[in-house]
Image (cartoon, rainbow, N blue to C red):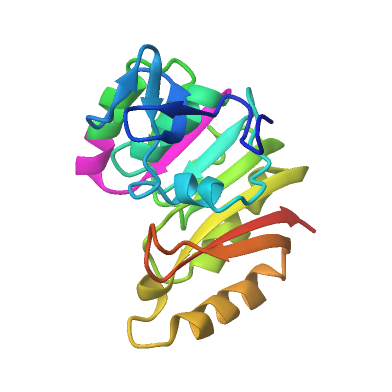
Amino acid sequence: MSDGLPEGVARRDFGDGPALATRGEPVYGEPTDGEWRRWDPHRSKLGATIEKGLETGLSGGDSVLYLGAANGTTVSHVADVAGPTYAVEFAPRSARDLLDVCESRGTLFPLLKDARKPETYAHVVETDLDCLVQDVATRGQARVAVENARFLAPEGRLVLAIKARSEDVTADPEDVFADVLDELRETYEVLDRARLEPYHDDHLAVVASPR
């Protein structure tokens, strides 16, 4: 940890003041400073979670399962820092972009799979992982986290971004968050949480550990 940041993450000045950064090849047109590249919290729920000061437990060299990798924006920063990083993405178009990101990151392994069906990638992903990062836009977000807990080490961490509008677009977000947290507590101990405004509306970041 450095200044409360995960190991491998730093603050660099890209011309408008200190900003989160990791070392790696640029992916989405982000500003760079030598080998460092900016990690934009407005484009990354995990980046916003770190900006909010939550202790993610993510550390340099950790093994990670990332659910909802999309086109690789956030998981590329994770792979800059972590060890083996398994990136699960369901949409073929996004997965094609993710493949391009993996070319320059030898520890990033893309999986065109559905995070709601961990049995389809259980033969590929190792167990006793250090961190499970989840950012999926679907109903049943708690159930996804519960079903994927099988991959986490007993002392591992879940870092989850709950998207209220994906669960119920008509409900009050706080009610949605309460329901998701109740279901999570069947399997996890919730360690910390925070709303992600102003970076992401109607999102709640949660850090938890397996029970």
The image shows residue 179, relative to residue 28, as above or below, that is below
Q: Quadrant of residue 31?
A: top left
The image shows residue 67, relative to residue 188, as above or below, that is above
Q: Position of residue 45 (x, y in %)?
A: 43, 51
Q: Is residue 183 visible?
A: yes
Residue at 59% across, 80% down: 178
Quarter containing the C terminus: bottom right
Residue at 57% across, 26% down: 82
Between 192 and 5, the one lying in front of the other is: 5
Q: Is residue 11 magenta?
A: no
Q: Position of residue 38 (x, y in %)?
A: 37, 30
Q: Is residue 86 magenta?
A: yes
Q: Quadrant of residue 12?
A: top left
Quarter containing the N terminus: top right
Residue at 66% across, 38% down: 4
The image shows residue 157, relative to residue 116, as above or below, that is above
Question: Relative to 197, is 155 on the left or the right?
Answer: right
User: Of all residues shown, which one is farthest toward the left?
Assistant: 93
